[in-house]
Every structure is written in structure tokens, then in C-alpha cells.
Amino acid sequence: MPAFIQLVAGAPDSDDVQFSPGRIAGILVAVEQRLEINLVAAVIGVWIFAVRRQAEGKTIMKHRLTVLALGILSGLYACSSGDPAGNQDTSGTTAPEQEVSQAGAAATDSRPNILFIVADDMGFTDIGAFGSEISTPNLDRLAYGGVRLNNLHAASACRSARLMLMASAGAVAASDPYPEAYRGAVLSLDYATIAELLQDAGYATYAAGKWDLGDVPGYLPVSRGFDRSFVQGRGSASFFAEIFRGAFGYWEDDREVTPEDVPEDFYATRAYTDRMLEYLQSTEEGTPWFAYLPYTAPHWPLQLPDDWLDRYAGRYDDGYDALREQRFRRAAEAGVLPAGASLDLFEPVAEPWSNLSPEERRRYSRAHEIFAGMIEYLDMSVGRVIAYLEESGQLENTVIVFSADHGASAGEHGVDTGRDPGGGGGPTDMPDDIDNRLENFGRRGSWIDHGRGFGEAATAPFRYHKGTLAEGGLRAAAFVYYPAAVPAGGVSSEFMTFMDIMPTFLEIAGTGHPGAGPYRDGRVISDIVGRSAWPHLTGRAETVHPPTDAAGWASGLGGGALIRGNYKIINQAPPGGEGSTPWRLYDLSVDPGEHYDLAAEHADIVAEMVEELETNWH
Ligand SMILES: [Ca+2]
């Protein structure tokens, strides 16, 4: 285990570590060299044998054997020039020599499949391997069997995270105005998506879940590189077969789906899983695939099938302040907290639980019971996909990445009782067709979230929550599972962003981004910003980014946040506040809770970073 990926003592399965990255690399080199020599000899032997047999008048399919021989040779060449299992030291985002491997790999394609699972509005400590009491055995097994990430930065909200993910660029750059689309914007055609580039590399590409990058023809997944897709085109549709806030909002490929098109017992999380399993089963044998599974759970409206509604009944009666302390302890025990994490100076925005009325407590705790059930349902659904991969013999050759899309939601809608919940209120007025009586929580027609206090319980020790550029908004719980090359049982505190996911996947697929220039359909695309994390994740590189790399987020108010090296600047006002504050500067390597403002000491660093933010990220 390399020192920069911490092996966590006592983590389940940590005793089962069989391969250090160095050993893997060594074994692969040796095996590959032997295989190469032996197979070349065997192929030549078979070919000579075939020619001789044909000369003797026997019916031998010389051409087929020749093709087979060339196939094996080109496959070997692919292995040696772009080994996806981590036997190559390419840390750049574009690797021209890897383009060769695509052509070679087509003959004997052993490139790994890529399964990318996203949870929507899930907090940092909401799964077991990150400190949760919620039952997530399937995710925990994968998390402890791979490397957990505690310094992956997404964005403050769903769409900006997806823009950065799909384009490997800043959210402002990757977004284009489009008045007819939901929220008036789409993912710009100036960027090739992960799916388009993996399609170019010969991967089958599937999406099931939340798209949120343009719910209009020409911008749906089917037009952005996905062979098959079943998605919520916009955010926050009902999980059931019902029109919700004026729309149903689901699309299958290029066809808008109506509630009449789906079964009466439609439930979104189940439907995404069913569709993805269908897509995977339909894949031609030998074709590697990219499965993008951005679940909409546990995003509001908090909803569950009736028989799942009461699984956590009574579990949150002690409230969010107690839960926050418990989560922090368990996350520390699980070894997943970064250096400097502490609750000592943590100041929740939500009102203390003890100040709430009995009715308020009942509503918040009930909402969080449903939220917890949605996470367990998501875990059960992931388990279905993993079971299929195991049964079909594909688990070992599939890189599985799981991530939240940002920090926990702190929405107050539907759950509050009219009191200002602290830090600015949520909407208390609801459309007439919404039924937010306590007894209807989680059922059809309800529109609730779980409130700021339970959101903060899951983002602590990080400050604030979804919708903010504080670490509680940006930092996403994540892990990478691939026993063939990723060490088991570790935790990486290396800085990464959602923009790094595309180049990472491209490297796994043995390909690279083509760079700025002409692309499909007359488009001219921009280059990417991210860097591949694969050398780091496979134990061959200490860092993903040099200290000069920066990542920025705009607040929409002329301010924002930028991280460069260990430093972060931010001028966003606290939740409920107006406008912006003076720039603050934090050293995240020792202060991930953003408590010690260093701006006065390092005015020069602040000035440099503000200029960087304004030049490249606005
Ligand atoms: Ca989200």
C-alpha cells in the first residue's frame, strides 16, 4: 500500500489485500513479456501448420487462422501500448500513442467495462463506509474493496456537477443558454461528452437516471453519445407514475415517456436499475461498455414504495444534533475523514433540535426516515447490478466508481411548519395538488425534503451543504472499486474534481481526448481541464494534480470559490445571507472545516487566486 493512500486499520476486508500496486505492476510486466513471447511463437506455429495442411490438400481455413493470428498479435500490441490495468505510466490527459491501442483492442477487446453510479443529494456520511447507520451492505463491500475518496470536489448543485463531469470543464464554460430547455440552459455542443468519446473508442454506452443537461431534442443523452438511455430529463420529477409540478419528465432514448407508458407501480430507482440491466444484457459479447447510472435518490421529493416507508421508523427521534455527533464518530472510526477534520468549531446553521416543537420534530425525523430508506433502496438496487455482473462473469473486468453529486441537500420545502428554519427559509406555500400531511410523507403527491439540520448532520465536519460552495456543498463521498489494479481498503485524500472523471475513464478505456478542434457533425470542440486520476488510484502516482492546477466555481453573484494546491478562496455569503463577503482563504490540507481565515496573512495569494477565478472560471 503506497503511503499516499492510507490503509485503514480495522476496515472490513483490509486483511484481504492481496496485491500491492507495485506487485501488480511487476506481475503484469512479467506475465505480459512471457505471454508475448509464447503467444507470438504459438501464433506463428499455428499459421505455419495451417499453410502446410492446406498445401497437403486438407480443408483448413487459412484465412480465419491468419485473422486470428493478427488479432492476437494486435491485441498483444494493444496490451503493451495502453494497458488499462495500470501497467503504464501515462498521466497526461491526451496520449496519442494510446490511439493505436483502440484499433488493436477491437480484435480482442479486454478493456474494462466502466460502471459509474451517482447518488443525488447524498451527504458525505450517508453510507456505511463513510460513517452512516443506514444499511448499505452492497456499497460498503465495494467501498472497502477499493479506495475511498475524501477530497473529491463536485459542484454546489446537480446541474453544475453534471456539466463539469460530462465536459471536463468549468460549469460556466460548459453551459449554453437555451430558452426552451428546463432552467433555460443545456450542455454546450462545444464539448465532447464522456459518452461520445467512449463511443468513439468502441464502447457501448448506456445511461439510466438523472440527465439534467438539456431536456430538449438534440441535447438528450441519445444525442450526446449514449446508445441507449432512460432518464429524467430535468431534475426533481416524482418517483412515481404521476405528473408532478406540471411534468412527468422521463425520456427513453428520443421519446418522451408519459405516466401511461409505465406500469402503475412505477418507482424511478427500480426503473433505472431494470433498464440498465436490460441494456447490459443486450450488449454484444466482447464489447466493453460504459454504464452511467446517476440515480435520483435520495433527492427530493422524498418518496418510497409503501413497503419501504417504515424501515427506519423511530430511528431519528433523537434529532439531527445527536445524529451529527454519531456520524462524525463513526466516520472517524471508518478512517474516512481527512486530516484536520473536527467538530470542535462546527457551527450548525439549523436551529438546535431542542428548540423544535414536538410537531416539528416529528415532521423532520419522519422525513429523514424516508430519506434513509431511499438510500437503502438505492443500495439494494446497486446490489442487483453487482449480482448481475457476478453471475455473468463481468465483475472482475469492470471498474466501478460511486460518487455523490455534491453535499447533502438541506431543503426545507414541505417539511417545515412555517417557522424560519434558520439560515433563510424554505418555501412553506405549496401548490394545491400537493399533500404534505405527515401521514402522506413519502407517498404520491407529497413534496418534502428532510431539512437543513439533517443535511448538516451528513455534511459535518464540512461546512454548510448543497447549494453552497463551502466544503459541505462541494465535497462528494466517493470510491473506486477495481481489485485488478486498485488497492483494497485504502482512503485517498488527494484533491480531485468531477472534471477529472472523464480523463480517468478515457485512460481506463485506453484512449484519450482528441484535444481542441473539429469533431462530429461539424462541431468544433474545446479541450478539457481535468487530469486522469488513474495513475494515482492504481498506486503509481502520489498526486493527480500539480500544485499549480486550479479548479473554480462561480457563485452566480460575481464571486465564487477556487481551489489551487492546498488553498481555497471563497466569498460566498453564508446560507440565507445576501451577496458576497470579503474573500476568505483556507488551507484545506489542515483545515477542511474552513475555520481559520488566512486572507489577511496572504493577501498576495488571495489576489492571484481571485484573478485566476475571474479569468478562467467565470
Ligand atoms: Ca444533486
Image (cartoon, grey):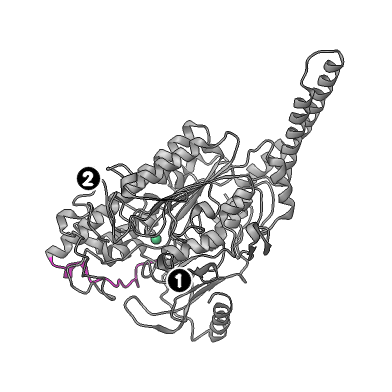
Q: Is 159 drawn above or below residue 240 in the view shown?
A: below
Instruction: Please indicate whether residue 41 sits to the left or right of residue 285 in the image.
Output: right
Q: Residue at x 75, y 41 (%)?
A: 77
Q: Nearer the viewer, residue 84 or 338?
A: 84
Identity, as a three-letter code, of the amino acid under mark 2:
Asp
Query: In this rendering, does residue 292 appear at all?
Result: yes
Identity, as a three-letter code, of the amino acid under mark 1:
Asp
Report the magenta residues as a range: 342-357
Q: Secondary structure at mark 1?
A: loop
Q: Which residue is mark 2?
A: 306
Residue 113 falls in image quadrant? top right
Q: Is 55 drawn above or below residue 31 in the view shown?
A: above
Looking at the image, the residue that sits furthest to the left is 358
Q: Residue at x 23, y 48 (%)?
A: 309
Label located before the other in sequence (2 or 1)? 2
Label 2: few (<14), some (14–19) or many (≥20) C-alpha neighbours in 10 Å:
few
Q: Are marks 2 and 1 in contact (CB under 8 Å)?
A: no
- Ligand 1 image-quadrant field: bottom left
Q: Nearer the viewer, residue 160 or 570?
A: 160
Q: Which residue is mark 1?
A: 591
Q: Nearer the viewer, residue 216 or 41?
A: 216
The rendered magenta stretch, by its main secondary structure, is classed as: loop
